């Protein structure tokens, strides 16, 4: 198990020596923030044609737009200049749970009920991408000119299926001056 860490450091030295890495501006060049799943079968940058420095990639189990995603997005947009958000759900996601089994599964694996109770499971993958895009479109802290789109990625072919075309959010409400 511990060899993994040694391998990581060795691979890192090879990466540094290869000259692939560059020092870049902290602001994403494509003004894009991608929200996708932590799934190991998703290579976010090559799948979306992105280069180092192009985009923020915020990964959560299930590609769900959680409160913590909104925390990251507030910084991504207002501090670091992103104006486009893209939700990328995927096929064969572990949080696709049509039978509502996740608590029972974890209780069995852990030998007791899990402390965490909010899993973000879903039964309708495209519908869930749409719902999470909708959450972004009405997010109270969204910036002006905020555009949201949603895709579903087939993890077996790497192909994206558009779910929500790019949609501009209404300007955020501001208290009267
Ligand atoms: Zn997933």
Image: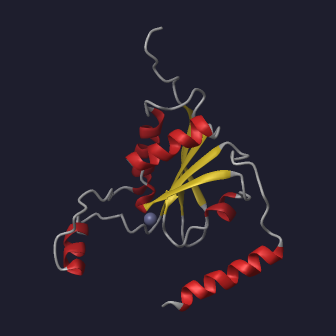
Residue extending farthest to the left is: 112
Relative horizontal placement of residue 168, taking residue 46 as reference (left or right): left
Residue visible at 46% across and 39% down in the picture: 136
Q: Is residue 4 above or below residue 20?
A: below
Residue 95 in sight in this render: yes
User: Does residue 43 appear left or right of residue 68 in this picture?
Assistant: right
Q: Residue at x 58, y 43 (%)?
A: 76
Ligand 1 shown in quarter: bottom left
- Which colour scheme appears in the figure? secondary structure
Q: In the image, residue 165 lies at what x, y percent?
A: 57, 41
**Residue 176, position in %: x, y?**
44, 9
Q: In the rendered image of this protein, does residue 175 appear above or below residue 164? A: above
Q: Nearer the viewer, residue 118 or 22?
A: 22
- Specify whether residue 166 is in view: no
Viewed as shown, does residue 91 lie left or right of 83? left
Residue 66, position in %: x, y?
39, 49
| Total marks in image | 0
Percent position of residue 63, x then y: 45, 56
Q: Is residue 86 above or below residue 138?
A: below
Residue 167 or residue 84, whichever sits in front = 84
Residue farthest along the right direction in this orientation: 19
Q: In which quarter of the view is residue 53 placed?
A: bottom right
Q: Residue at x 45, y 44 (%)?
A: 71
Furthest toward the top, the residue is 177
């Amino acid at each position: 198990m511990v060899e993994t860490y040694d391998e990581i450091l060795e691979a890192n030295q090879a990466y540094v020596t290869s000259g692939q890495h560059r020092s870049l501006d902290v602001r994403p060049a494509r003004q894009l923030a991608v929200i996708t799943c932590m799934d190991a079968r998703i290579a976010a940058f090559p799948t979306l044609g992105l280069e180092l420095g192009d985009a923020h990639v915020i990964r959560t189990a299930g590609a769900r737009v959680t409160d913590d995603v909104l925390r990251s997005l507030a910084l991504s947009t207002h501090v670091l200049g992103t104006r486009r958000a893209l939700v990328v759900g995927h096929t064969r996601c572990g949080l696709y749970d049509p039978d509502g089994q996740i608590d029972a599964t974890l209780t069995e694996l852990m030998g007791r009920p899990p402390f965490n109770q909010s899993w973000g499971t879903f039964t309708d993958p495209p519908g869930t991408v749409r719902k999470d895009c909708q959450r972004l479109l009405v997010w109270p802290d969204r910036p002006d000119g905020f555009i949201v789109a949603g895709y579903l990625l087939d993890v077996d072919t790497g192909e994206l299926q558009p779910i929500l075309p790019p949609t501009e959010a209404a300007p955020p409400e501001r208290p009267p001056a």
